[in-house]
Amino acid sequence: ELKVEQNPLFLSMQEGKNYTIYCNYSTTSDRLYWYRQDPGKSLESLFVLLSNGAVKQEGRLMASLDTKARLSTLHITAAVHDLSATYFCAVKAGGTSYGKLTFGQGTILTVHP
Amino acid sequence: NAGVTQTPKFQVLKTGQSMTLQCAQDMNHEYMSWYRQDPGMGLRLIHYSVGAGITDQGEVPNGYNVSRSTTEDFPLRLLSAAPSQTSVYFCASSYNGGSEQYFGPGTRLTVT
């Protein structure tokens, strides 16, 4: 059974600081996704990571994937208040034809001035 | 494009009542899913469909039914609501099995 764990679950940051959210998963995967959710809102796709060593960047967020370590990271550079949200990683198990995703618990990020 | 739409936005049910949560997408996506979101547990897959007429169970299917008669629509039926089904329900669609999923705005359901 595929398990996905994120840490930390809660992250309080000051504006301008850097930090990393970690996503560990338990079995082989061929795709990993990062989503953002604002309070009371739906999920917004941030990144799709397809292969070992994949790195994607959008603004102050950069995601990477290490399939050998079964680990993805979401790095935040010079945080700003607008990045406050809940971030989820989701993993598609390897070998499955449909994108049955298993989600992590989510990381609640709060950026303070 | 409206994307993925869900109705209703909010619903309160009494234990034992039944209802249908509606989901529609206008992106001609073959793949559609239903998730529930509970605090501290991320999202969990209830049922999914890989095309019209084809559905299958996800991680937490008990108490829910689905059908997919058209590409656009994927309703979720609660047969006999229980307080444990109090949750936020999201519908999602994707172009294929590996592409990103697009989520609807959610339905917040309370069962008393």
Image (cartoon, rainbow, N blue to C red):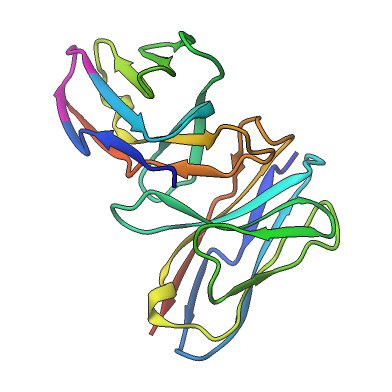
Residue at 34%, 20% in the rendered image = A74
The answer to whether residue B65 is left or right of residue B69 is: left
Residue B94 is situated, as x and y percent measured from the top left of the image, at 69, 38
Residue at 67%, 41% in the rendered image = A98
The answer to whether residue A95 is left or right of residue B37 is: right
Q: Which quadrant holds the C terminus of chain A?
A: top left
| Quadrant hosting residue A86 | top left
User: From what the image shows, is residue B22 above or below residue B102?
Assistant: below
Visible residue check, residue B78: yes
**How many numbered marks does the figure carry?**
0
Residue at 54%, 89% in the rendered image = B17
The answer to whether residue A11 is left or right of residue B4 is: left
User: Magenta part of the protein: which range?
Assistant: A12-19
User: From what the image shows, is residue B100 above or below residue B63?
Assistant: above
Q: Which residue is more in the foreground, B50 or B10?
A: B50
User: From what the image shows, is residue A64 above or below residue B103?
Assistant: above
Residue B75 is situated, as x and y percent measured from the top left of the image, at 70, 65
